[in-house]
Image (cartoon, grey):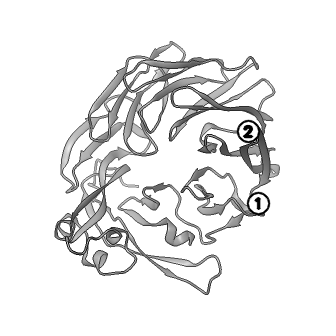
Amino acid sequence: MLNHKTIKTILTITAVCLISLARAGEKEGSKIELIPVYEKTFDDTIVDVIFDTATVSIEEAKKIGWKEEAFTKEKVFAAEEVEKLKRKVKISYPKVIITGEKGYPSKQKIKFLDKNGNIKKVILNDKTSRIIVSTNGKYILKALLYNCDTDSGGGAVLYDNDGNFICEKSKGAFYAVTDNGYIGTGFVSPEGSWYPFIIYGPSKNKVKEITLPEWGIFDAGIQANGKYFIITYRGKAGFDSTGVLVLKEKGEVVFQKILPGSIIPKDVLPLSDTEFIVISMAGEGVETEHRIIYIALRNNNWVIEQKHTPDFLGFPLFTQISSKPYIYSVDRGYIIELNTQPFKIVLIEKLPSDLKFFKEKFYQIKENRIECFNLQEVLK
């Protein structure tokens, strides 16, 4: 791969919001033809993007980069809310772009844009850190490197997606931010280092400090998903079982149980306060088995149903893609419908990996563009 220092990478972000389905009958595995109707060119390599929507005139939309085809076809995302008399249209546009090199946070920049693509503000990532974005794209957490050996460094700065400063913490190992700007710290490493699990509000006040059960904890991590914090922890028994703790962003415990298998925080998906999907891995090597554990509160009792995933899914890192019972296998590119037995693979033809979701749309970041299409067109 060419070094970005020696060649200027021009990235074209193509928001593909017109989808044409070339169906071979009604069977699964239909080929998807994506037709780009929007293009935007930037001067830097794009690592991540946050989208927003704006209602503009059709004429203004064309100046921004939308093509005529976006407003002349029937099933077009950009034209879903066209007011014919006022000639208005609701469009999506890149509101924040993170530029630089993947894997090199210190070389990255956070650029805040208006709907025309003009840069309003730039935040440099001048130290080694992680850039963490809330699932709704409204908050950006710049978490600085924490040295667990010396209990030094760390801290975080929280911004909204307009680039406004929200708060700053000078110390701590930060890993998560919720959709309302609550931030979470904490870990326990197998090597024995640790940092307490603490939730802070957007005004940097401590909301709650979490004490894990006395279970001989040797490994624990934290992740945010929407309005929830998820902590998973393991005892001395190793990877045969995992403690799962789900909290609302203000610290109220929603769910806590020991579940079979190895589970990491990002593989716990809260569908609501009383319904969860958990991805569990058991076994080793060729005998490794992945299971979807469905958990629901019924008549004041937690019902846990364990189901196997299709054998060919490999290591499934799942994300919820809509309010409907669908999840997406990130590494394998398959959509799975949960309310069937056995699980139904909605789309046999593999989708691209590393997808983002916005307003029930798929967005894929590529080296030279971002593609978008309507999720519901695929799932119908």
User: As displayed, is residue 36 above or below residue 234?
Assistant: below
Of the numbered discs in the image, which one, if any, rests on residue 22? Answer: none
Residue 148 position in % (x across, y down) = 53, 18
Q: Are discs 1 and 2 less than 8 Å apart at CB?
A: no
Q: Residue at x 23, y 48 (%)?
A: 113
**Which of the 4 image quarters holds residue 348?**
bottom right
Q: In this view, which residue lies farthest toward the front?
A: 299
User: As displayed, is residue 304 above or below residue 75?
Assistant: above
Say which residue label 2 marks: 262
**Which of the 4 image quarters holds residue 281?**
top right
User: As displayed, is residue 217 above or below residue 230?
Assistant: above
Residue 155 position in % (x across, y down) = 41, 21
Mark 1 surroundings within 10 Å by alpha-carbon count, few (fewer than 14), some (14 through 19), many (20 or more): few
How many numbered markers are drawn? 2
User: As displayed, is residue 22 above or below residue 195?
Assistant: below
Say which residue label 1 marks: 311
Measured in 3D between alpha carbons, the distance from the residue under mark 1 to the one under mark 2, in whole angstroms, is 17 Å
Q: Dot 1 lies on which element? A: helix
Residue 132 position in % (x across, y down) = 43, 37
**Which of the 4 image quarters holds residue 191?**
top right
Q: Quadrant of the C terminus?
A: bottom right
Q: Between disc 1 and disc 2, whose residue precedes?
A: 2
Amino acid bearing label 2 = Ser
Q: In this view, which residue lies farthest toward the bottom?
A: 25
Amino acid bearing label 1 = Asp
Residue 270 position in % (x across, y down) = 61, 43
Q: Quadrant of the N terminus?
A: bottom left
Q: Dot 2 lies on which element? A: loop
Q: Residue at x 29, y 79 (%)?
A: 69
Mark 2 surroundings within 10 Å by alpha-carbon count, few (fewer than 14), some (14 through 19), many (20 or more): many
